[in-house]
Amino acid sequence: MINQLNPVWQMGLIVLVVLVFSSVMVALMRFLRPQGNFSELSSRIKAWWIMAAVFFGAIAVSSRISLVFFGFLSFWALKEYITLLKTRAADHRALVWVFLSVPIQYYWVGTNWYGMSIIFIPVYMFLFLPIRLVLARETAGFVASASQLQWGLMAFVFGLSHLAMLLTLPAIDNSSANGRTLLLFLVFVVEMSDVLQFVWGKTLGRHKILPTVSPNKTWEGFLGGIITTSLAALLIRFLTPFTPLETVGVALLLTVAGFFGGAVMSAVKRDFGVKDFGGLIPGHGGMLDRVDSLCYAAPVFFHYLRYFHY
């Protein structure tokens, strides 16, 4: 019966089963250990129910709604980042162009103009932003402003827009895979890796992997998370054109890329002196706290697919 479902709905059913199982397990742990503190885990699972519903709703309806949804993710992540910057008065007009670049970038993606979507931010915005800052006639802090704004565009607009770029990929011959199913594979693998690294780290974590950057991340959590996620990816291989061996290899690549995406964003938060980028999602912090891994994993996955499968 499950095999007769559309791959997107098959994936939705799998996620539903995982969420129900997780909720039951938390309820069972509270019953068996009433003295234990499971509030953080419980709030995370409740947030996952909401995020999963919103995500599947956004990608299951239409490509246009999906495009708007991912554009909003980029906008909000960029907003959380910009809010933490110590900007100058001279930066304000440049900031207008920074935020305008979000709909422009997603317009290129929506019109399937691959060339422009790939070079707009790394080339044209890279050239334009310093010019806009120069016209403000303020040299003090110029380099810091130009570099911070451009880095934010690269990570939170260009990087995350690769999620929407996946939707533009056509179906692959002799396979049920298409851009939508490949997007589901990416998001499931990266987010599941985050969850399993958290679980393994909490249960077995002893040796810090990046103590000055992210003290909660351990070698046990990192290795346990990426290995179990890579094996679990075999359960959703039907979303991809990959062989079993390639599925494990790609999942391993994505989990490592996602880990370093999260580590980089942890370094950013430590530099700013904050625990989370925001408080939009209970138990998860801000939007950027939830998509930080995807900023790195999405471009890696998209270009891997274009090179090896298109």
Image (cartoon, grey):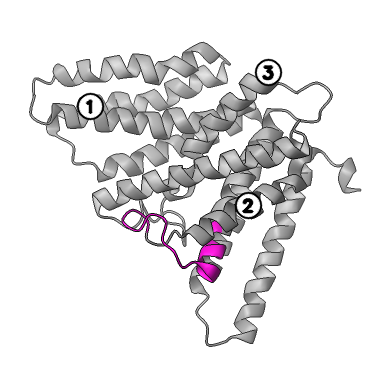
**Magenta segment: does it hold 106?**
no
User: Which of pointers 3 and 1 lies earlier in the amino acid sequence?
Assistant: 1
Q: What percent of the width, then of the height, locates residue 244?
A: 77, 39
Left or right of residue 45: residue 88: left
Left or right of residue 95: residue 264: right
How many marks are shown on the rendered structure? 3
Q: Does residue 163 show up?
A: no
Q: Which of 56 and 17 is in front in this view?
A: 17
SS assignment at label 1: helix
Three-letter code for the amino acid on which mark 2 is drawn: Ile
Q: In this figure, which residue is indicated by the disc labeled 3?
A: 310
Q: Which of 119 and 199 is in front in this view?
A: 199
SS assignment at label 2: helix
Quick one: label 1, few (<14), some, or many (20+) residues within 10 Å?
A: some
Q: In this figure, which residue is indicated by the disc labeled 2?
A: 227
Residue 310, above or below 231: above
Where's the C terminus, which quadrant? top right
Residue 118, above or below 42: above
Q: Does residue 296 show up?
A: yes
Q: Quadrant of residue 158?
A: top left
Q: Give the range drawn in magenta.
A: 197-214
Three-letter code for the amino acid on which mark 1 is drawn: Ala
SS assignment at label 3: loop
Q: In this figure, which residue is indicated by the disc labeled 1?
A: 146
Residue 287, above or below 137: below
User: Which of pointers 1 and 2 lies earlier in the amino acid sequence?
Assistant: 1
Kindly report which numbered mark, 2 or 3, lies closer to the viewer in this rendering.
2
**Magenta segment: does it hold 203?**
yes
Q: What percent of the width, then of the height, locates residue 137?
A: 8, 20
Q: What percent of the width, then of the height, locates residue 237?
A: 76, 40
Three-letter code for the amino acid on which mark 3 is drawn: Tyr
Q: Would you say the residues marked 1 and 2 are in contact, meaning their CB atoms lie under 8 Å apart?
A: no
